[in-house]
Image: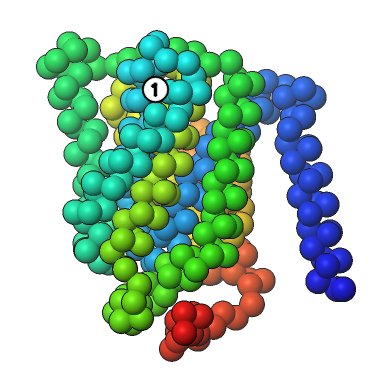
């Protein structure tokens, strides 16, 4: 009965939050809902990153690659197709690209995987730059502008879809498979789990939402180039957001994205010339004193690494 009451309370609070978020464009200034769109964008990137990396403990620094692919999909196809189709194609291209990357790299582990994913993003950036200069004779593109309100709601829908996907995966047997891979790939393999297939598929799923976010935000930025679309700072920022909120926590990435996006906005406005230094100090402090993230302070102790998660497959 107590569980039912708590669950009803959570559902009620969630409903109120959704209603409040849904009416923001009607009762606030343009600055608020445009800033909220940026917050939603980072939240999508952080939640999608955590879908795969949070459980599997693989550290990907390739978020900018799939985000940039979504942006350039919108830039190339924005005039040829309606916005919903362009967004779906952005996610689809990111999914297919992640499958190819996963097939060739997810046998790597640890720092080797992190370095490869970072290098892949840089490879895409310079490849697109070479193509634009030598083939199209330009370095930048104009993207068809999307109404800011439409961008706001579209990004919100993708964020809710990413959260729902994350919840479904973490509550399923596949989610336990990812967690067990993070604890011991060898033990998971011996229990009959196709480790490689699981890693590749969920890496591609997480990358899909990054591509969707890129395709949506391109219509708000309107002017893009390879340095903007494949900015490596995005990859590092996403990882830090997850760490601040709480890695492997359901709502940790959402909390981290909200806090760091707001802090970045305040610092950039109030301390323009010292913004990056202050931002870095805050991040270092959080990592040193909150290694499990903000939600990690309240999380219950998990099952032991000796086989608690693996026992769910027995």
Which residue: 39% across, 22% down?
Answer: 74
In the rendered image, residue 81, in percent from the top left (x then y), is placed at 42, 15
Q: How far from the left and from the top, in percent, is residue 98?
A: 30, 46
At a point 73% along the width and 33% down the height, the residue shown is 22
- Label 1 SS: helix
Q: Is residue 301 left or right of residue 71?
A: right
Q: Which is nearer the eye, 122 or 14? A: 14
Name the residue at 42% across, 58% down: 52
Q: Is residue 219 above or below residue 92?
A: above
- Identify the image's colour scheme: rainbow, by chain, secondary structure or one colour: rainbow
Q: Is 91 left or right of 153, judged from the image as shown?
A: left
Residue at the spot 26% in from the left edge and 53% down from the top edge? 102
In this view, 296 is above or below 90: below
Q: Which residue is mark 1?
A: 74
Q: Can you see residue 261?
A: no
Q: Is residue 175 visible?
A: yes
The quadrant of the image that shows the N terminus is bottom right
- Residue 208 position, x and y percent, is 41, 42
Determine the image quadrant of residue 239: bottom left
**Looking at this view, is 288 or 28 the one in front?**
28
Image coordinates of residue 189 in percent, x first then y, are 31, 76
How many callouts does the rendering have?
A: 1
């Amino acid at each position: 009965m107590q569980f039912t009451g708590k669950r009803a309370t959570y559902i009620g609070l969630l409903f109120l939050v959704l209603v409040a978020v849904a009416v923001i464009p009607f009762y606030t200034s343009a600055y608020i809902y445009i800033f909220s769109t940026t917050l939603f964008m980072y939240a999508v990137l952080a939640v999608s990153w955590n879908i795969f990396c949070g459980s599997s403990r693989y550290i990907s620094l390739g978020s900018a690659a799939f985000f940039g692919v979504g942006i350039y999909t919108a830039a190339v196809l924005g005039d040829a197709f309606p916005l919903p189709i362009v967004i779906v194609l952005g996610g689809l291209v990111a999914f297919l690209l992640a499958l190819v990357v996963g097939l060739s790299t997810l046998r790597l582990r640890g720092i080797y995987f992190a370095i490869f994913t970072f290098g892949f993003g840089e490879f895409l950036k310079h490849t697109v730059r070479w193509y634009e200069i030598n083939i199209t004779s330009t370095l930048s593109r104009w993207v068809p502008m999307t109404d800011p309100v439409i961008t706001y709601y579209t990004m919100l829908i993708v964020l809710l879809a990413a959260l729902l996907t994350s919840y479904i995966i973490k509550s399923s047997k596949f989610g336990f498979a990812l967690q067990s891979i993070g604890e011991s790939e060898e033990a998971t393999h011996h229990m009959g789990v196709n480790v490689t297939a699981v890693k590749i598929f969920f890496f591609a799923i997480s990358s899909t939402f990054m591509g969707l976010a890129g395709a949506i935000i391109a219509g708000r930025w309107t002017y893009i180039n390879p340095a903007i679309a494949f900015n490596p700072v995005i990859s590092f920022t996403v990882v830090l957001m997850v760490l601040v909120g709480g890695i492997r926590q359901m709502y940790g990435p959402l909390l981290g994205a909200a806090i760091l996006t707001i802090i970045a906005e305040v610092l950039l406005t109030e301390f323009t010339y010292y913004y990056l230094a202050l931002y870095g100090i805050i991040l270092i402090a959080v990592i040193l004193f909150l290694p499990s993230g903000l939600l990690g302070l309240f999380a219950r102790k998990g099952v032991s690494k000796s086989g608690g998660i693996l026992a769910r497959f027995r």
